[in-house]
Image (cartoon, rainbow, N blue to C red):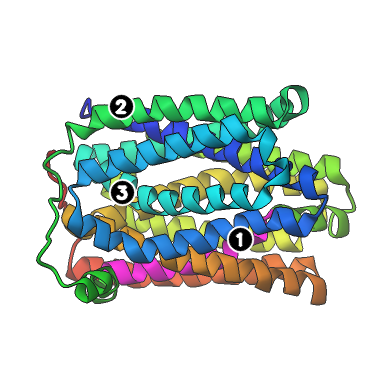
Amino acid sequence: MNIAFYPYWAAKTLLSLINVIYIMVITTFIYGLTGSVLSAAMFPLIQIITRIIAGFTLPLLVNRFPFSRLLISISIAKTLIMTCIAISLNQLTSQLPLLLLGVVILSFLDGWETPLLKTLTPRLVQGEDLIKANSLLSFSNQTVTIVGYAMTGFAVMNWGASQTFWAATSLSWAVLIFMIAMGSLTRNVEQPQKSAVSRNVLREGWSILWKNPTLRLITLMDIAQALAGSIWIGAVTLAFAKEALGRGEGWWGLMNSSYAAGTMLGGILALALAKRIQKHLIASITMGSLLFSLLTVVYGLNNLPWLALVLCILMGPVHQIRDVAQQTALQSSLPVESLTKVYATHGVLISTVMGVSIVIFGLVADQLGVRWVYLIGGALFIVSAICSLSLSRVHRNQPITKHTKNM
């Protein structure tokens, strides 16, 4: 595997950990400051809305600035803002609007940075190593997320929000060092096209997404999965534990831990089966989607607490293998020069769908009962599987090609 991948992997892993600490600290801080669940809930809502807007504007930046300069500049800006918040967090108790302004700016920068980082994977890794790279990134992301939530909760209780936020800020400076190290490797990547008309630039990602049959189907699958993904938010899983299984918060935590363990196991399994997944990319997506939909429906109909734990563990590997294969198929379906704009567009769609789905499934759970949430979710995963069957036909007529190139 290209040696340049490893600092990139370290940066991505640290960013996942920083994101967990950032979310938990700011949410805890706002709730402690206001005592309002609604005020605390505004934080993730602001994040989603701001990232959607950022996704619309990213193509203009890509066409105006060199890739490496853009990536490093965003990282510098994020690190400086994180440092400013860390220095003044205790003083912001009387200045909540200033804190929310910082959240808006950081969310904008995240909305620009995430698609840029996603395009680096196929730039740094080619061929069969692409599956391994995606599996490794997915596994490390899941691992630090799980560990991060556990550690951050402990840290906030014992050290306080301000000291814990300083830990995230310190990690941000480490990420900046990795970004600068990667800058020399990406200096000649995706030079800006300043002659492009702004209106055409903004539409380019949407046009590619619609015209490329493979991308179109993968995006439809992602939309179905994003709609269904809200069935795993904390409020819904807690309601299921109480209403369907007759258990309390302790069992709810055990279910979350079981799914986390299954996800980590899935990451290891995807790494071990990387060559087979690469060889049978579309089949892996199809089987993963079908199995996940079946497990979700069985989970929704189940009354046995112990079986719920088993199903949570089984879902992890299926989810990981499907996601790794699907991500690789997307990366391999078009030239790397177009990936940033496509990822920006893709992110706008998925963020919008996820925001809407949280509201929809909240209403379904209240009006029809929590079981219906999982049955509808299972049906949406079946829709995703049907799309993957169509993807198989498209692939036979127009195989997914390897557009990746050396840096």
Name the quadrant containing residue 108.
bottom left
Q: Nearer the viewer, residue 76 or 215?
A: 76
**Extent of the magenta region:** 214-233
In this figure, which residue is indicated by the disc labeled 1?
A: 45
Q: Residue at x 48, y 51 (%)?
A: 105
**Looking at the picture, which amino acid does disc 1 mark?**
Leu
Q: Residue at x 58, y 66 (%)?
A: 355
Cα separation, mark 1 vs mark 2, equals 33 Å
State which mark lies toward you, 1 or 3: 1
Assign the N terminus to one quadrant of the image. Answer: top left
Q: Nearer the viewer, residue 109 or 322?
A: 109
Cα separation, mark 1 vs mark 3, equals 23 Å
**Looking at the picture, which amino acid does disc 2 mark?**
Tyr
Magenta highlight: main SS: helix
- Which of marks 2 and 1 precedes in the sequence? 2
Quick one: SS at disc 1? helix
In this figure, which residue is indicated by the disc labeled 2?
A: 6
Q: Residue at x 50, y 32 (%)?
A: 83
In this figure, which residue is indicated by the disc labeled 3?
A: 116
Does residue 8 sit above or below 193 in this rendering? Answer: above
In screen coordinates, is 246 left or right of 40?
right
Q: Residue at x 35, y 43 (%)?
A: 74
- Which of marks 2 and 3 precedes in the sequence? 2
Residue 226 among magenta residues: yes
Task: Give coordinates of residue 374: x percent, y percent.
Answer: 68, 65
Task: Give coordinates of residue 391: x percent, y percent.
Answer: 32, 68
